[in-house]
Image (cartoon, rainbow, N blue to C red):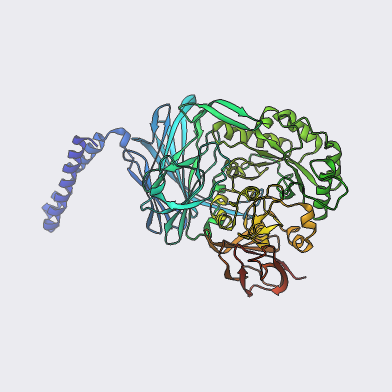
């Protein structure tokens, strides 16, 4: 406000106050009543003059806004003076402090010295029914929104959910194409909290890191990380930094701020790439900008997921809700389910009269196993085609014979492919797959999330959907947050999963009970469980061709309930499973999608107990780290009625022989109370179905 306007406003207010004071003392006199009515007139004129003197771009604007979640527990305080910044409070307690945002488009700093044209609010309250049910059959999409429209041709939208906060930029610039040189997104915390930080070496990565706790101040600006970073903000609450609805833009990464915060960083736009072997397509020259995109664009959401308990991270759906709705009209053909996988078990089948390996006879054996147990898919992993050419099948496989045999047995075939080879041969390869009747593709080795690769994930999902094929992306985590937009994008890796046990001890129970609160927050994760060779810390050895897994047999079973993946793999060999009929009583029927999810008890990095419902059946999975523990639970989530529970429990000697377990069958109902006894690195799993 200018000096003249300020002076006029001051004089006007002073005049009103004096007139009211005068009238208060002399109101009994009839003459003075006339004076009391007349004296405010000059002051009103002064106020009008002051309003006229205010510069027009400030008219109607304000410098701060307040937005609350529907339940009132989360508050976002937005300030616009000088630069856009915001605080986030949880039940009145500050958990993000003066966090800043801006966008450098064609060297114009959007968010710096913003000039607000208008501000609008709205409330949304609707039910979303996912095409592929990861946690729930129905999700409440309930939020309050504030939209700040700026004079410079852009807007910033804030949303407050009961599950957290989010914001995004929207531009409507006159240029058809613009370059984005950078995006500032600083997540500043009020104290030096502990963060579970998946630190990376570079932007070229499979995103298969461990989420290790460290103090915010210990993370240097050079230390990159993928998502999410989960921050313990005290009093049991957790904050997960993530993103959603990324399109035509690079993926968000994080780095240290040198203080009590985390800052956004992005892989730059690639100018030149170099191929090593058939799969490592690295960026060798980059631009000084991060994206070249449309002048009219809806940018990705920057997500601050908030949970008041550790278990709240597991049921939090904010990332999914912020994704763009499905781009597919017909989704009736999308069938989630389990898949028998060859690569982890190195085709170690036995008791057959043919040489096991990458050949037609071996895959017919996998198909027979899948058909016997109602498993809808079999994967042909690396080796089925001559690397570098998806149209050249190795001579040991007769693809026409194999796919015909699969159809006869009502089993679908999914093919593993290297992403770059698929990109080079996309249309002819997918057309050939369609002729064979292939049901899906597992795309691997991208190791990038720059703008070109984000565009690639959309292109492959779109082209696969045209041919009614599922997609499982390995080699990057970003597709995990695109599954609402592309329901045929059935799962994603970008997780340190069980494959690591073939060469290291890094896929172990401590890590396993961290993942449900961290990586799984983004969306489904293809961890690939199901090991039948189970090892303790003393008995484990990484043997590539004869793999085993750390932790007990029952921890492996519990993963099918705790870990979310609508395309869930059976990683061990069919021979190993068929030797374990009691195990297949669980692994055969266990679903991969869920109508309801309840976290019964959980502590990040220590243990987790989850109950999930599919139809009328409930499943319970419990996992612990290397600490043996007894966990009391109640079955009050069950409806009225009588049920039968088939449980799989760590055996008395599971601390020495990780494969030791026992199966029990007992009647239960909603009043039943149990104590789950988990061995070191142990687990517990149960199937609960209603008695007839």
Taking the view exactly as shown, the residue that stands out farthest to the right is 353
Q: What's the residue at 79%, 43% (across, down)?
A: 357
Q: Answer with left or right where residue 448 lies relative to residue 620.
A: left
Which quarter of the image is occupied by the N terminus?
A: top left
User: Can you give x and y, in whole percent of width and height, for residue 164 in the image?
Assistant: 47, 52
Q: What's the residue at 64%, 39% (across, down)?
A: 327
Can you see residue 238?
Answer: yes
Q: What's the residue at 77%, 30% (across, down)?
A: 391
User: Can you give x and y, in whole percent of width and height, for residue 611 in the image?
Assistant: 63, 63
Q: Answer with left or right where residue 374 lies relative to residue 506.
A: right
Nearer to the camera, 555 or 317: 555
Number of numbered discs: 0
Can you see residue 38?
Answer: no
Q: Answer with left or right where residue 650 lies relative to residue 234.
A: right
Nearer to the camera, 371 or 644: 371
Nearer to the camera, 178 or 540: 540
Nearer to the camera, 125 or 628: 628
User: Can you give x and y, in whole percent of width and height, for residue 283 in the image?
Assistant: 55, 29
Which quarter of the image is occupied by the C terminus?
A: bottom right
User: Can you give x and y, in whole percent of width and height, for residue 7 in the image?
Assistant: 17, 39
Is 132 situated above or below 551?
above
Is 395 situated above or below 126?
above
Q: What's the residue at 62%, 63% (across, down)?
A: 682
Residue 120, quarter of the rendered image: top left
């Amino acid at each position: 406000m200018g000096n003249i306007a300020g002076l006029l406003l001051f004089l006007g207010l002073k005049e009103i106050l004096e007139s009211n004071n005068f009238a208060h003392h002399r109101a009994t006199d009839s003459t003075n009543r006339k004076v009391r009515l007349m004296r405010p007139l000059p002051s009103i004129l002064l106020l009008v003059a002051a309003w006229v003197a205010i510069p027009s771009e400030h008219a109607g604007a304000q410098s701060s806004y307040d937005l609350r979640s529907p339940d009132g527990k989360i508050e976002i305080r937005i300030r616009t003076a000088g630069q856009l910044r915001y605080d986030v409070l949880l039940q009145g307690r500050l958990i993000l402090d003066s966090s800043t945002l801006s966008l450098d488009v064609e060297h114009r700093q959007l968010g710096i010295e913003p000039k607000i044209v208008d501000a609008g609010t709205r409330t949304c309250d609707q039910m979303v029914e996912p095409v592929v049910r990861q946690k729930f059959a129905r999700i409440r999409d309930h939020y309050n929104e504030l939209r700040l429209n700026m004079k410079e041709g852009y807007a910033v939208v804030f949303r407050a959910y009961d599950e957290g906060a989010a914001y995004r930029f929207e531009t409507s610039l006159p240029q058809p194409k613009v370059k984005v040189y950078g995006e500032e997104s600083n997540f500043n915390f009020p104290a030096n909290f502990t963060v579970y930080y998946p630190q990376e070496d570079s932007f070229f990565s499979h995103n298969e890191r461990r989420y290790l706790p460290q103090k915010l101040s210990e993370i240097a600006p050079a230390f990159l990380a993928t998502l999410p970073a989960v921050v313990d903000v005290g009093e049991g609450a957790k904050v997960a930094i993530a993103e959603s609805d990324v399109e035509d833009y690079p993926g968000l990464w994080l780095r240290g701020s040198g203080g009590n915060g985390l800052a956004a960083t992005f892989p730059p736009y690639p100018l030149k790439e170099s191929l090593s072997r058939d799969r490592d397509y690295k960026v060798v020259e980059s631009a000084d900008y991060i994206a070249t995109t449309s002048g009219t664009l809806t940018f990705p959401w920057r997500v601050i997921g908030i949970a008041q308990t550790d278990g709240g991270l597991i049921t939090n759906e904010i990332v999914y809700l912020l994704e763009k709705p499905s781009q597919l009209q017909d989704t009736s053909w999308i069938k989630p389910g389990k898949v028998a996988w060859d690569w982890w078990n190195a085709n170690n089948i036995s008791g057959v009269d043919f040489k096991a390996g990458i050949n037609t006879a071996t895959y017919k054996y996998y198909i027979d196993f899948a058909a016997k147990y109602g498993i809808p898919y079999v994967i042909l992993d690396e080796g089925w085609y001559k690397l570098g050419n998806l149209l050249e099948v190795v001579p040991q496989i007769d693809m026409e014979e194999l796919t015909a045999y699969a159809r006869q047995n009502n089993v679908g075939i999914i093919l593993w492919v290297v992403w770059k080879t698929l990109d080079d041969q996309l249309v002819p390869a997918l057309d050939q797959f369609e002729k064979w009747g292939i049901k899906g593709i597992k795309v691997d080795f991208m190791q990038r999330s720059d703008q070109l690769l984000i565009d690639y994930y959309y292109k492959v999902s779109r082209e696969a959907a045209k041919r009614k094929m599922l997609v499982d992306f390995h080699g990057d985590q970003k597709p995990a947050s695109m599954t609402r937009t592309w329901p045929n994008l059935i799962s994603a890796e970008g997780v340190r999963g069980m494959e690591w046990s073939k060469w290291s001890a890094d896929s172990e129970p401590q890590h396993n009970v961290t993942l449900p609160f961290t990586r799984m927050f983004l969306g489904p994760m293809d961890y690939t469980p199901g090991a039948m060779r189970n090892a303790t810390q003393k008995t484990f050895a990484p043997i590539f061709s004869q793999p085993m897994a750390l932790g007990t047999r029952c921890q492996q079973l519990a993963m099918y309930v705790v870990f979310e993946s609508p395309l869930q793999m059976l990683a061990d060999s069919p021979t190993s499973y068929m030797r374990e009929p009691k195990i297949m009583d669980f692994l055969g029927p266990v679903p991969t999608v869920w109508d309801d999810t309840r976290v019964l008890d959980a502590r990040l990095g220590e243990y987790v107990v989850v109950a999930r419902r599919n139809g009328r059946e409930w499943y319970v999975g419990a996992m612990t780290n290397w600490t043996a523990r007894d966990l009391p639970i109640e079955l009050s989530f069950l409806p009225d009625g009588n049920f039968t529970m088939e449980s799989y429990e760590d055996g008395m000697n599971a601390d020495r022989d990780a494969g030791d377990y026992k199966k029990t069958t007992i009647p239960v109902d909603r009043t039943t109370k149990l104590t789950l006894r988990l061995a070191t690195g142990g687990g517990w799993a149960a199937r609960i179905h209603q008695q007839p």
